[in-house]
């Protein structure tokens, strides 16, 4: 280990002999040590040198340890300060902790205790700085101005999204799977006033019905088998920030009144408790089902729907925004190259033409996966048309990217139409609105054809 690579410590104490002993111990452990005989001298050091940690005695002439602590925190609150206390100074040490001291150590010093406390202080600071850097990267990644799309339909969506990001209004995002609903939710959060607070995502369809209430609202110790301690739920974890409820259409009917209460009263009740707890949480929900269809079918409460859809945002499928496909291809291509270390890989323009003609039933997520697959399996020199998966590259017969094999001896057009409609309904679990969007026809036109072919039953 290279000497002094662990950090720089400012040691402040008016006891010269004690100061020398502690300086030697810290130096031997690998720290660079700067000494000061009192608080006044320490302030001069802090004005000219960078330090990673301060260890200071409390009782000193001119400037006391508490005064030094206050001045350090006022100038740079990130520097951890450890105070040294003599016997009987516990109350003063507690005051120091209230003023922002990281910890205190008792005199006479224990060698191992000092080194452990300094190590914890520096480790805490490093972790906090890393978390801040990570948050900055996340905020940069999910800013709304990073959302890619120049098509008219996407431009209209983004105008709405940018407006709602400046408020705390509840938003319901709808759209097919893979259209980027969570990305938009994060963009709203990280572009708004709550961006410094948590963004908590919950997939309502991935949690068993028996556990989802405890997951959302928390629980009291002993409220059910396995509840070993009082536990916060997602609402409390997101306090001050945003709770993203993905697949809200799969929330059990029995739990929907409790979510409605949270939206109305801004308070939750943990499982096993009677007292309500206030929460300050912005709700953004999302679903790939048509919420109005769910209301008509009785699987979703109408009052909850209206509470969630204060501002509805419908994300268009990728086939309805083909102008954006080349932009997305280039974006995902650059990202995949960086991720897999293929910085010199090129992309032939012919690829954009092929991908722009494909229907992308999996939407933006499918496009991203296709590009990453092509990069990983490439020759690391250039992506060519032949690198595109067969089912994308040869959809064929000029049917707008849809793969249809026509028999040479002819086909019944009505049979073909019936099969296409049946397939669309099956693909979207019988949801008429989504099937109509998939077929690019109106819902009433779909219902007419369903009745015509006996598919409405």
Image: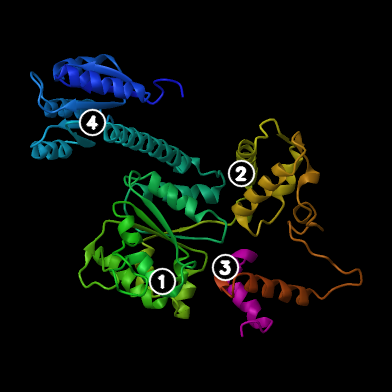
Residue 355 is one of the magenta-drawn residues: no
Disc 2 from disc 1: Cα separation: 38 Å
The residue identified by callout 2 is 328
Q: Nearer the viewer, residue 304 or 94?
A: 94
The residue identified by callout 3 is 434
| Tag 4 near tag 3, CB within 8 Å | no
The residue identified by callout 4 is 81
Q: Earlier in the sequence, mark 4 or mark 3?
A: 4
Residue 273 in the figure: left or right of residue 339: left
User: Which numbered disc, 1 or 4, marks the residue closer to the eye?
Assistant: 4
Q: Earlier in the sequence, mark 2 or mark 3?
A: 2
Residue 393 in the figure: left or right of residue 11: right
Q: Earlier in the sequence, mark 4 or mark 2?
A: 4
User: Which numbered disc, 4 or 2, marks the residue closer to the eye?
Assistant: 4
- The residue positioned 11% from the left and 39% from the top of the image is 90
Does residue 401 sit above or below 80 in this rendering? below
- The residue positioned 45% from the left and 21% from the top of the image is 2
User: Which numbered disc, 3 or 1, marks the residue closer to the eye?
Assistant: 1
Question: Which residues are drawn in magenta?
Answer: 435-457
Quarter of the rendering containing residue 407: bottom right
| Tag 1 near tag 4, CB within 8 Å | no
The residue identified by callout 1 is 211
Q: Nearer the viewer, residue 83 or 131?
A: 83
């Amino acid at each position: 280990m290279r000497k002094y690579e662990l950090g720089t410590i400012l040691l402040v104490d008016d006891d010269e002999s004690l100061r020398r002993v502690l300086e030697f111990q810290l130096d031997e452990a690998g720290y660079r040590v700067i000494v000061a005989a009192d608080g006044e001298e320490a302030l001069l050091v802090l004005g000219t040198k960078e330090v990673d940690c301060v260890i200071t005695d409390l009782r000193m002439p001119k400037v006391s340890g508490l005064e030094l602590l206050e001045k350090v925190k006022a100038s740079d609150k990130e520097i951890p300060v450890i105070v040294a206390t003599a016997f009987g100074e516990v109350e003063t040490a507690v005051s120091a902790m209230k003023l922002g001291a990281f910890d205190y150590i008792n005199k006479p010093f224990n060698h191992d205790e000092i080194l452990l406390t300094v190590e914890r202080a520096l480790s805490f600071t490093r972790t906090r700085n890393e978390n801040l850097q990570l948050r900055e990267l996340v905020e940069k990644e999910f800013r709304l101005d990073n959302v890619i799309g120049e098509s008219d339909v996407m431009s209209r969506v983004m105008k709405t999204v940018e407006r709602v990001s400046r408020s705390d209004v509840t938003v319901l995002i709808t759209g097919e799977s893979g259209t980027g609903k969570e990305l938009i939710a994060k963009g709203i959060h990280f572009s708004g006033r709550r961006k410094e607070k948590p963004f908590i995502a919950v997939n309502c369809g991935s949690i068993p019905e028996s556990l989802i209430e405890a997951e959302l609202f928390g629980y009291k110790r002993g409220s059910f088998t396995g509840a070993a301690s009082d536990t916060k739920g997602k609402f409390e974890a997101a306090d001050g920030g945003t709770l993203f409820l993905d697949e809200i259409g799969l929330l059990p009917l029995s739990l929907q009144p409790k979510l409605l209460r949270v939206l109305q009263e801004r308070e939750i009740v943990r499982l096993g408790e009677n007292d309500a707890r206030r929460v300050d949480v912005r709700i953004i929900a999302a679903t790939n089902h048509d919420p109005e269809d769910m209301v008509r079918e009785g699987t979703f409460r109408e009052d909850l729907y209206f509470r969630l859809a204060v501002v509805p945002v419908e994300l268009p499928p990728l086939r309805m925004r083909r102008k954006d496909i080349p932009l997305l291809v280039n974006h995902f291509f650059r990202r995949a190259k960086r991720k897999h270390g293929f910085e010199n890989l090129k992309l032939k323009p012919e690829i954009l033409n092929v991908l722009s003609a494909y229907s992308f039933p999996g939407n933006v997520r499918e496009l991203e996966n296709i590009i990453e697959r092509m990069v990983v399996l490439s020759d690391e020199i250039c992506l060519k048309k032949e690198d595109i998966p067969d089912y994308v590259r040869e959809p064929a017969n000029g049917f707008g990217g849809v793969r249809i094999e026509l028999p040479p001896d002819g086909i019944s057009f009505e049979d073909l139409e019936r099969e296409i409609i049946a397939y669309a309904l099956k693909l979207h679990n019988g949801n008429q609105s989504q099937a109509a969007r998939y077929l690019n026809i109106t819902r009433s036109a779909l219902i007419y054809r369903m009745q015509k072919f006996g598919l409405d039953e």
